[in-house]
Image (cartoon, helix red, strand yellow):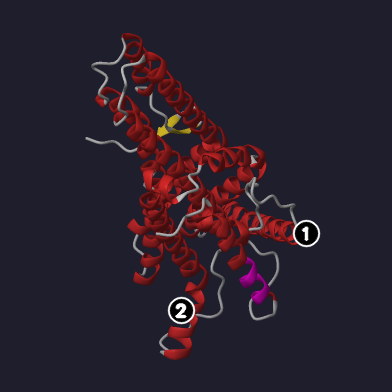
């Protein structure tokens, strides 16, 4: 297998970040100044998304104030939640760029650069897993957003122009308050482009941050697992002066990984918390829509939205569990090591490593919750 680069883990996240005009971090090997084009794309996305969000919010307020179109308003609330999650994630990554760059610099420094070391790290296994999950999640969200964006147009083409079974008319993909008469004139196409643009921005903002988090988590997990293997299979000499040097290296490596895990939580803690809370509301709103009886074609849209929201929560919980397992595995690796004939000072020091590793690292949504699955 050819030598891999760290960018291979991050290519999907970087693709979606580029689409919304964000450079999430700098690299030691590739520093770049923000270009005018990137800034233009970013602010165009943010302004357009904010205007669509405002229109949707006004639509919901008017619906509840007048008591009309309540069911539609609840669906729009799902869209609002989706947009808020995307905007929140983009804002925090943009705000925490310096801290995120610091993590990337450390991971780049630790990244194995020769075929021999990459084989020792079993890097190809982690890269394959990360790429498979990233591609699947990217495709799922791309299908979701373009199904929503093009659903009304597809209905118009199929039912009205092709089958001629009913009149659909030119409608917009998302319901929002528009303070002028837009049907049947050029502003319809402007609004259609704006809503499609906003929908893609929101989806890309969510996908990019989730994929970045999972890629960084995968790299940290790889280092935890590698550290566990070198501890478990280390052949001790019984000489304290030699074995203590090995212990010192292990402790330094372990502390560095724990520090990286803590910095990851500091950057993504608030987005994870808001993501969990808002996604829960979105799932409830979508579930409500599915229970009141909707046409089969609309049911497909809602089901896709529900599955995507559930997969998003699962993806984060899955990597949270992997980090917890990998970090706590250091204790098991230290216990499995053949330390029976080691110097007594070595064995006493090893106890401290085991004790520290029994407090595993987690993906934390601030101080309120730990993101991890549960193994029965």
Residue 360 on image: x %, y %:
38, 27
Q: In this orientation, does residue 67 appear?
A: no
Q: Main secondary structure of the magenta part?
A: helix
Ranked by sequence position, the earlier of labels 1 and 2 is 1
In the rendered view, would you say 153 is above or below 81? below
- Closer-to-camera residue (318/185): 318
How dense is the environment of label 1, judged by Cα within 10 Å: few (below 14), some, or many (20 and up)? few
- In the image, residue 251 sits, relative to residue 304, either above or below, namely above
Residue 9 left/right relative to 52: left
Residue corresponding to mark 2: 155
> Which quadrant would the C terminus be assigned to in this image?
top left
Magenta-colored stretch includes residue 168:
no
Q: Secondary structure at mark 2?
A: helix
- Residue under the point 37% across and 44% down: 120
x%, y% of residue 45? 67, 59
**Region rendered in magenta:** 188-194
């Amino acid at each position: 297998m050819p030598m891999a680069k760290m960018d291979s883990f991050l290519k999907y996240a970087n693709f979606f970040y580029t689409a919304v005009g964000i450079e999430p971090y700098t690299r030691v090997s590739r520093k770049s100044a923000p270009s005018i084009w990137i800034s233009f794309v970013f602010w165009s996305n943010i302004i357009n998304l904010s205007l669509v969000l405002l229109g949707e919010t006004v639509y919901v307020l008017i619906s509840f104030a007048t008591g009309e179109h309540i069911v539609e308003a609840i669906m729009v609330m799902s869209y609002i939640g989706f947009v808020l999650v995307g905007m929140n994630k983009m804002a925090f990554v943009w705000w925490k760029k310096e801290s995120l760059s610091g993590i990337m610099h450390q991971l780049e420094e630790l990244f194995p650069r020769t075929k021999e070391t990459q084989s020792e790290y079993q890097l190809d296994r982690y890269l394959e897993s990360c790429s498979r999950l990233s591609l699947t999640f990217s495709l799922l969200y791309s299908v979701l957003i373009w199904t929503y964006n093009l659903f009304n147009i597809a209905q118009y083409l199929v039912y009205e122009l092709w089958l001629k079974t009913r009149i659909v008319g030119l409608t917009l993909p998302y319901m929002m308050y528009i303070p002028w008469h837009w049907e049947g004139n050029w502003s319809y196409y402007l609004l259609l482009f704006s809503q499609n643009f906003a929908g893609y921005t929101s989806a890309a903002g969510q996908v990019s941050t989730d994929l970045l988090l999972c890629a960084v988590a995968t790299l940290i997990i790889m280092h935890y697992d590698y550290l566990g293997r070198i501890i478990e299979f280390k052949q001790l000499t019984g000489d304290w002066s030699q074995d203590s040097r090995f212990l010192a290296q292990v402790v330094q490596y372990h502390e560095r990984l724990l520090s990286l895990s803590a910095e990851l939580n500091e950057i993504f803690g608030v987005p994870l918390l808001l993501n969990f809370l808002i996604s829960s509301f979105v799932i409830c709103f979508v579930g409500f829509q599915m229970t009141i009886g909707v046409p089969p074609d609309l049911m497909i849209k809602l089901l896709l939205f529900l599955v995507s929201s559930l997969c998003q929560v699962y993806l984060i919980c899955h990597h949270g569990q992997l980090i917890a397992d990998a970090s706590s595995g250091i204790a098991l690796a230290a216990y499995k090591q053949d330390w029976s004939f080691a110097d007594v000072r070595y064995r006493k020091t090893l106890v401290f490593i085991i004790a520290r590793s029994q407090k595993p690292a987690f993906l934390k949504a601030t101080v309120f919750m730990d993101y991890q699955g549960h193994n029965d």
